[in-house]
Structures are given as structure tokens and as C-alpha cells.
Amino acid sequence: MNMESIAPVRPDTNFESTVYHLKTGGSGTILEINNLRLWYGQAQALHNVQMTVEKGLVTALIGPSGCGKSTLLRCINRMNDLVDGLKIDGEIRLNSEDIYDKGADVIALRKRMGMVFQKPNPFPMSIYENVIYPLKVDGVNDKTFLAETCERALRGAALWNEVKDRLDQSALGMSGGQQQRLCIARAIAADPEVLLMDEPCSALDPIATAKVEDLINELAGQYTVVIVTHNMQQAARVSDNTAFMYLGRLIEYGDTEVIFQTPKSGKTQDYVTGRFG
Amino acid sequence: MGSLEQNPPLYSASEPHGNRSIGAELSTLSGRLAVMGGLAEAQLAAVVEALATRDSEAAAKVIAGDEAVDDLETEVNSRAMRLLTLHAPVAADLREIVGALKISANVERIGDYAANVAKRCVIVNEYPQVPAASGVIELGHLVRQYVQNTFDAYAERDIAKAEAVWRGDADIDALHTSVFQNLMSDMLVESDHVLACTHLLFAIKNFERIGDHATNIAETIQFLVAGTRMAEKRPKRAATDPPADAYNVLGGHP
């Protein structure tokens, strides 16, 4: 990154520093975000975000619209790179490697991180082709291996029993909830180190939402999940740690139970109880 | 990089509320619980007065008045259930509601004990006054003050006051032990006093239990306000506590 072009860190008198009470998973840290600052043109969207993500745990990012939670998520797999006028400063390390390093291979990086979006985005091809797509792109041709991976990923996404008899049918014929679980299956087929989810349930009905939440619980441990959600009850249900962001700042980050029972910051308290936002 | 955006203004908690009704419903809930506490406290004050003045009619009113405390408990519980169901509350809101459920159960028991003492009072009044009764009344006054401080701490959300109440329970226990000994001694000396003193023994036990419930309320206030527990174990075995054989006035095994 071009450090010269970015203003020095200014003392930030309007906000207290982040309150931390992180719950550890015992498997160490997979992501490390150090003093991350980001600007869209002149507007600063992230202010000195400092956090680590525990391996194998589910981490939720919450906060009112425009707080920077999706921006932060998109920084983690460098999806923001193509945004015009974007400037970024600080570092993000995935298993100690700086992902913004000049020599970093962005395509390789994204293979290490599965991403699930707000709206299910299956490709216009069969269920089977959807799931194995990331492997096909990688040049894998071994039919047995592909079939095994497909089954494993669909089982992992709690979808196998529903679709095993129609793997050759178009994914576009599935229900919205099934499509979203298919996207999760596609994401885990490549065996990523981190699963990033950007409001994965906001387009789903309550039943489909419950299935995806169950799935997130099952994936935890095996995968590290970072999820952005507008639904605070969802954050409370699925995550181990919760990061509360407000106006581009990380206000409080730690054990989800503490965030929703005895938050340490008054701002967190006011947000989770619906006093603003 | 050019000028950064100005530090944005802090939000204000008085901004239009995302969830307007929960605030109003919560203040109604704590208001009704405060009314319930006030009623139980009035019941307790009335029964102490009935003991002091040997007024069976006043005691009968306390017995009849317990139903109103029970009704308020039902109301507080259903308001709390409604809040839990409709608002899925978290953080301080959740603690406020769970706290109200716990406190209302304690207040209901305080009301029951006040009514129990009133029943004893009606019976005791059929016998001549015993000298040890003054100690019973003194204990009643102490417990009433203690309960009043507890409800003040709840109304003011005052942790320091709650903690003072919590520590003060040792005084009640000490006075209870001393009155117990006086009643036993009285019975040993005057066999005519045995019937009245036996009923008064139950009365002081009820007062002592009221103190325990007030202590529980003090602990809940701490949880409700700060989300923490009292820093240490309750000073149950303090210097003021009776020795293990304090209740054994005969000197042998009880």
C-alpha cells in the first residue's frame, strides 16, 4: 500500500477505544486485522479497526447500516480492490500472511476464503456443476474425486438428502433457502480456511433461515465463519464472538453472550436494546 | 490524502427510538413492581404495629391484605412474560425483566411471611403479654427498615445501597438469635408463657426469613443494574453471628 498518500493517524477524541473481551477457541488466531483504515474517496469508512478472529469460531459483525461491517468483510478477501477511489491502510493477516502484500496472489487468496452473499447466486447450471465449479476452475478432472467432493460439500451444507436424486437438474429450480445452502456447499467444496457470509439469510423465510443457522452451527469448529448480519437475534444465536461497529469504528468486540447480556460499552447497550440504529 | 471527514457527532440515546414501546413497557413493569414492594412493606409495617399494640383487628387486615400482593405478583409476571415474548429483549432490558421476575417472587414471600406473623399475632393476643415480646417487636422494626432500604435501592437502582442491605442481614440474624434466647429463657422461667412464646418463636423465624428474601432482592438489584454478582460470599458467619450452640439455652443437645 502507498503509505505516503494517506494522512497520519489522528487522535480520535470523540470515541473511546474499543472494548475487548474475546472468547478464545483454543485453536489460535486465523485472521489478524491491524489498524485498518479505509476511505471511499474523501469519506473515511473504517477507523483504526483492530481485531483478531479466532480459528474455528463464528464471529458476527453487527451495527447499524453504514457502520462499515460489510466494508470490513469485503476487505478480508480483497473484494474492495476494484472500488474506484478506495484507499486502504493497515494490514490484514490470514494465518500470518499479509493479504495486502504487493506479492500476494488475490485469486489464490479468494480460494482460501469462501464467500456467501445476501442473495443466493447459483450459476445457471446443474446442482452438481455448481458445487464442483471451484474445483473445475482449478483444473481438477478426476470424476471420482469430484463426485466425492460434491457429496461431502452437499452433506456439509445439509442439502444432500434433498437433492441427491436430482443433481443433474438446474440449480435455478431450487427454493431460495436451498439455493443459499447450495452456495454454502459451493463455498465449502474448495475447503476454504474462512467462510465469509454477508447477510446470508436476509432474503430467506424463517424456516430457511433456521436451516442456514443450524448449518452455520454445524460448520463451526471445522471452518472459521465471519458473518455480517442485520438480525441481532441471529448474531446472538449463531456466533461465539460479536463485533459491534458504529460509524466505521469497532466499538466492542468479544464474547457474544457478554455483548447481549452485559455489554461493556454504553453504545453497544443502546444498539442491541434497540435504543438507536 | 486530503482532509478527512470531521469526527461525526455521537448518537444520542434520546434520538427517536428504534423500539419505542419496550421502554414504556419496562418502566410500567418496574413501576408495578415498586407498587408491589411498597404494599408488602406496608403489610410488614402494619403487622409490626399490630404486634406492638396487640391489635388483632389490624392483624386481621394484614391477613386479608396479602391477596393484593399476590395479585400484583401475577400482574408483574404476566407483564414480564409479555415483554419477553414480544420484544426478545437483551442486555440491560433482559436483566431488568429477569430481575423483576426474581424480585416479585421474593416480595410475594415477604408478603406471605407478614401475613403469617399476623396470624401468630391474633393468637398471641389471646394470652397475657410476655416480657420477651418487646424483642420480637424490635426485630420486626429492624426487618421493616431493612426491607424499606431494599425497595429504595430498587427504585433508585442504587448498588451501594443494595450492598449495604446485603451486608446488614447479619444484624438481623444476630438480633434474631438474641430474641430467640430471650423467648426460650422466658419459657423456662414462666411455664404460663410457653404458649405465647411458642407462637412468637414462629413469628421471629418469619421475620428472619423476610431478611433473607430482602438479601436476595439486593443481590438481584446488583445483577440488574451492573450485570455482576456481589463480589464475595454473604457475611453469614460474621463476628456478630451466634456460636453454634446459641440456640441451645438448656446447655445440652437440642
Image (cartoon, coloured by chain):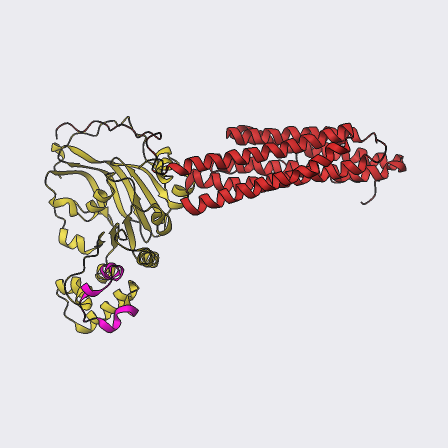
Q: Chain in yellow?
A: A
Q: Nearer the viewer, residue A144 or B62?
A: B62
- Give the vertical position of A211 relative to B138 (above or below): below
Q: Give the main secondary structure of the magenta stretch.
A: helix
Q: Which residues lie in the magenta part? A: A161-183
Which quadrant of the view contains residue B211?
top right
Residue at 24 percent across and 70 percent down: it is: A148
Q: Nearer the viewer, residue A165 or A218?
A: A165
Q: Does residue A51 appear left or right of residue B165 in this picture?
A: left
Q: Nearer the viewer, residue B189 or B65?
A: B65
Q: Does residue A157 appear left or right of residue A265 in this picture?
A: left
Provide residue A178's location: percent of width, then percent of height: 26, 62
The colour applied to the residues of chain B in this rendering is: red
Q: Does residue B61 appear left or right of residue A172 in this picture?
A: right
> For residue B2: magenta?
no
Q: Point out the image quarter for the N terminus of chain B.
A: top left
